[in-house]
């Protein structure tokens, strides 16, 4: 909920200091993917990644609303997807090695 709220605010407060926009996207989706992998261990990672990428797409659609005065960028969605893939995959790998 925090991720969506911050993405939809017209003038969100700065997070992570003065970190670039892409870094903020990467951080948010890495955390979301890791938490999703931990929270839903029985779900295939592909399903979780599709949900997270859909969420990232929703954020970009909302940011395209002119009244919000935000920028929608396909590169933000790609950063979201890459972070989710890496962090979600790494978390699942870690979970699997702990079981052995």
Image (cartoon, rainbow, N blue to C red):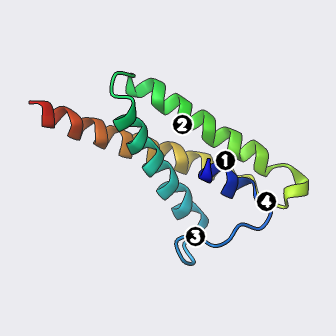
Q: Secondary structure at mark 2?
A: helix
**Spatial distance from mark 3 to mark 1, Cα to Cα?**
21 Å
Mark 2 crowd level (few <14, some 14–19, many ≥20, 10 Å Cα): many
**Spatial distance from mark 1 to mark 2, Cα to Cα?**
15 Å
Mark 3 crowd level (few <14, some 14–19, many ≥20, 10 Å Cα): few
- x and y percent of residue 99 in the render? 13, 31
Q: Residue at x 58, y 70 (%)?
A: 15
- x and y percent of residue 40 in the render? 39, 29
Residue highlighted by disc 3: 15
Mark 1 crowd level (few <14, some 14–19, many ≥20, 10 Å Cα): few
Q: Residue at x 54, y 47 (%)?
A: 80
**Spatial distance from mark 3 to mark 4, Cα to Cα?**
16 Å
Camera-nearest label, 3 or 1:
3
Mark closer to the chain start, 1 or 2 = 2
Q: Is 9 on the left-hand or right-hand side of 29?
A: right
The residue most toward the bottom is: 18
Q: Which mark is residue 74?
A: 1
Residue highlighted by disc 2: 52
């Amino acid at each position: 909920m925090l991720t969506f709220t911050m993405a939809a605010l017209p003038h969100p407060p700065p997070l992570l200091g003065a970190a670039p926009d892409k870094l903020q996207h990467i951080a948010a989706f890495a955390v979301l993917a890791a938490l999703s992998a931990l929270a839903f261990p029985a779900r295939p990672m592909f399903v979780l990644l599709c949900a997270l990428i859909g969420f990232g797409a929703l954020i970009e659609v909302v940011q395209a609303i002119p009244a919000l005065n935000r920028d929608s960028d396909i590169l933000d969605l790609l950063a979201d997807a890459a972070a989710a893939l890496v962090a979600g995959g790494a978390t699942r790998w870690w979970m699997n090695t702990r079981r052995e």
